[in-house]
Amino acid sequence: MLSHQPWYHGNITRSTAEDLLSKAGKDGSFLLRDITGSITGGVAHNSRSFLFISLQASEGVPIRFFSVLPDLVETYYKENMGLVTHLQYAVQKEEEPEEEPEPCSLPPQLPPRNITSNECKDGHSDSSRGTDRGTELARPSISDTYIQRLQQIDISNLPEDHQKSIQEYFRSSVCVDAEQAQNGNPTLPHFKKLTQSICKNLNSEIARTLPSLEALQKVLDQPLSPGVGRLRSQLSGDATQSVAFRLEQLTKLIYSIEDKTKNAVFDSVGYDGGHRKSLIPPVTFEVKCDSLGISNKMYLKVDVEGGKVYFKKSKDGPEDKYFVHNKILQLVKSQKMHNRLVLVVETEKEKTQRKDFVFDDTKKREGFCQLLQQMKNKHSGKPEPDMITVFVGTWNMGNANPPPNITPWFQSKGQGKTHDDTASQIPHDIYVIGTQEDPLGEKEWIETVRGALRDITNISYKQIATQTLWSIRIVVLAKPEHENRFSHVFCDSVKTGIANALGNKGAVGVSFMFNRTSFGFVNSHLTSGSEKKLRRNQNYVSILRFLNLGDKKLNPFDITHRFTHLFWLGDLNYRVDLPAQEAENIVMKIKLQQYQDLLARDQLNIEKEEEKVFLDYEEEEITFAPTYRFERDTRERYAYTKAKATGTKYNLPSWCDRVLRKSYPMAHVVCNSYGCTNDIMTSDHSPVFATFDVGVTSQFVSKNDLSKDAEGAIKIMNCVAVLLTKSKTKFFIEYHSSCLEKFVKSPEGENQENTDGSIKVRFSGQVELTPIIADPEYLLDQHILICIKSTDCDESYGEGCVALRSAESSYTEFSIKLAHHGECTGLLTGGIQLPKSDGKQTEKLYDFIKVGDDPGSGKGKSGDNTKMSSSVLTTDISNPSYMGVGYKSNNQSDRGPGSIMSPRTGSSSGHSSKDMTHGNISPKKTSYDHATPSPTTKTSNPISEDGQTPEMFENPLYGSMSASRGSKDHLPPPDAHFAFSKTDLDADRQPPVPTPRIRSFTCSETKPQSSSVTNTMSSGLQPQNITKKPVVPSRSEGGTTGPNRPPVPMKSRPGQPQELQPKPRDYRDSSELPSKLRLQTRSGQPKDGMITIVYSTHSFFVQNTRSGSRNSSVN
């Protein structure tokens, strides 16, 4: 196949093909491109309409076979081939410059051959299928294996008694040790007996000489003069010190033999390697609590293993007051004060009590929450987990061996959003480590990582999968207790180096099922060079299209839609897009920790904002310094210049190493840390870490009587698609899901003419999907994958995903963005309805921690509160948005953006905004309020006990309310990429509209000084200056306003002391930066020229501080 011929393009998307045909501007212009397993032809006619045909025989047409593509094209040049006009003009595609090879002193290493990797790629690894358990019976026993190895070794020079002891151990005793280890005794008594027998003379000699050496040490262990000290250090390397050297080597050898013997024996019987010894030590936190308006110091001691939290008045005080894990109902994090936490506990007679604590800093609060979450998980009594923790790390090793100690990387220590020391000992369930320019062999690197994890957690982690492409590698390790929960493990790799043939650049990936939840991990090393941004974008698309992971039944979907949770990590090589002359200024900004100015010019953030790569992926806010390019063995200096034959090359400090993620809508995933490690300095890159709490599902067991199992179907109706294509073919929808026995096709849709090069397709009627299990509780954890295809070929014109949890209470309308091969291709709207549920849902472990604010917290007496479930505002921390999905039901507030056509929000650094929908918490054994917008609870309008509507913050997903001035019918302007006219959607069914919310906000009469600030925040939430005085809180926010009395402005409250402005935190000490989307604690008076609008249920006040006038109006 000749790639230079202009009519054939092997790696090109449909939208790009249509653009090329449109630019040709001639009837009969054509091109060919290959999609999955077939060749597709594109033909232009009337300069606008395109007919894409799959070059296959249709019914009634004789099948013709072509050995080479030129013969096929020559045939289609002829007249009357069923086309509008014969093929006349071949379309030339713009040539792309190939990547220049990077100079290297050493020849590229061949990829290491590894049987485990090949087995994993074919889906035949030991951990990938439970069916391999049967083959283990056919394997030789551990005794036979070592006897055969012993026979291949010459042991004739060993003492005769040592020979007999070794042979006897491997002949019989090793099996006894293995049997005892399987029964829970990991001490290996017979192996200890063997080593004691062999080292009998050594032990007696050590016992005889050790007292003499200790006496000599006491004589010599005295303060020495500097000269004697230098002489002593010089003699330490002399050959006369060989006795100490030999003893050290002997000690290392004994430890190594013990470790390898334990690993071999434990692996042979599936023992967990001693994880039962893994204990999280008790941790004590110093906090402050308010009692009757007086702040008192207290100490909270968390005993994870014992399942208790002790409340002590002094650090060494008695531990007589405590709460057991099942009496701690909920943790509520404050949004306004990032170091404040509310504990909801159950007291006697099933009453609930709220305890309000203030920690020293945010990291201490997060550490406390993680320990309590670990305690809840450990003592939940559930047979299968519904939440796990995942560590994701990426490191470009720079072709240098790692340092002896790499544990800080796995403990999330360093810069950025890091773990507190109190939580650094918590072991994660899964560790995913991606490396680039890795000089080690596969086995050597895996043992290095396992050894580091063993030092931290005392757990011998199991290898689930590994995949290597030249020096790009990904390793997945998991706790031994989870080994049987993994299935369907697949590995694959894609080369994107020179001519897409070399593996110096590319990606490796691993996918698996954890119980009933699918995971995908991609580690990529993209093209280097600041000027090669477009080439990196092409690398991403190639990986997206050709990386073969996940369920093979989901062929219409690329890896973006195949997994519940997809994590993309690696050296993505996107740079800070500034001139080389700005190098010194960049370094200065880094020293001042002014990262946001640089992130605004980050190529990846810019490309994401323009939807060119990583469409709808999320990345935690970056609060750490650029990870490239450092001088080796230091982290004080950046080496941003490099001498080459063609001149000086600049590598400006950049965030090359990143971790991004994408999850199905309404799937629970929370990022707990994202940063880089400072003290691993062997490479010019710093290792990057990220940790996540991830919701998972297990095999469903219905609580209902199986004979009376619920019957019903998933109903999808009123679907309308707007596709960005000029094709005149007919379309239909395919519905895929793990809850369906097989995928379902819809009837053909009715095409309607549309504007701006798009087509509108209406799918009339109703499609009913019959699930395998019709229990509504089971269905709420499922998702429906939607694929729109044409009838003349098997190619998809757009894919999306709908969460069934969105239709939890009633018929719900949805609006989702469609994408194909990383490009946005349209919009799909419709309605969905599930069978009704009469039973109560099972609570999830990840509902234990919420984010919110109590309007009355800290103001009243801390006492019993049996109705507190409606007095605390909580925030859903699950995945708020997926492909622009939005939902709206008849009696529900929106769970996401109302329309795909709303403007993109977020900071200039490209970080996705989080959904801050408010609800209530749900304490156990009290009136369960489903208002919490968590994946397991319903939404409703949060109303406090006195009937007042709590304060609602501006949600960036709903556009700016400041521009609308409180208009209830305000909608954000359409995205330019989807600038469809109002006639695109019928009048009888509009796309979902966000529910109006009662809000407090500030609007200014003066324009901001810098347009760059306003451009970074489309929702108007970000203040222009960190010292700007916020809005004065109303009395209804403080919880002191009566139910029938309107709030009084702050100035008119006699005797009411003004709340002090909290001192801003110095984030340079903890390497944390304040989030761009968080509001300050509102205190003090508004600035001159500001208009304050405060809403409540009964009245609102408008205060103009410029004129000094104050107007009020009672509703």
Image (spheres, rainbow, N blue to C red):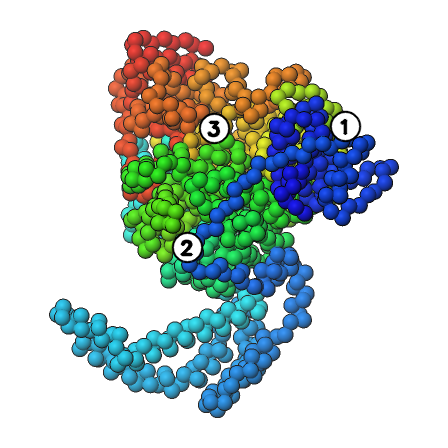
In this view of the protein, can residue 847 be seen by the observer? no
Alpha-carbon distance for marks 2 and 1?
56 Å
Residue at 18% over, 73% down: 231
Residue with the mark numbered 2: 398
Residue with the mark numbered 1: 84
Outermost residue toward the right in this view:
60
Alpha-carbon distance for marks 3 and 2?
36 Å
- The answer to whether 218 is drawn above or below residue 302 in the figure is below
Q: Position of residue 465 (x, y in %)?
A: 56, 57
Q: Amino acid at mark 1?
A: Val
Residue at 60% over, 48% down: 547
Q: Disc 2 on helix, strand or loop?
A: loop
721 left or right, relative to 163: right
Q: Amino acid at mark 2?
A: Gly
Pick the front one: 473 or 843: 473
Residue with the mark numbered 3: 905
Q: Nearer the viewer, mark 2 or mark 1?
A: 1
Q: Position of residue 552 (x, y in %)?
A: 68, 48
Task: Judge the density around disc 1: few (<14), some (14-19), many (≥20) Cα neighbours within 10 Å.
Answer: some
Residue 721 numbered mark, or none? none
Residue at 47% over, 41% down: 532
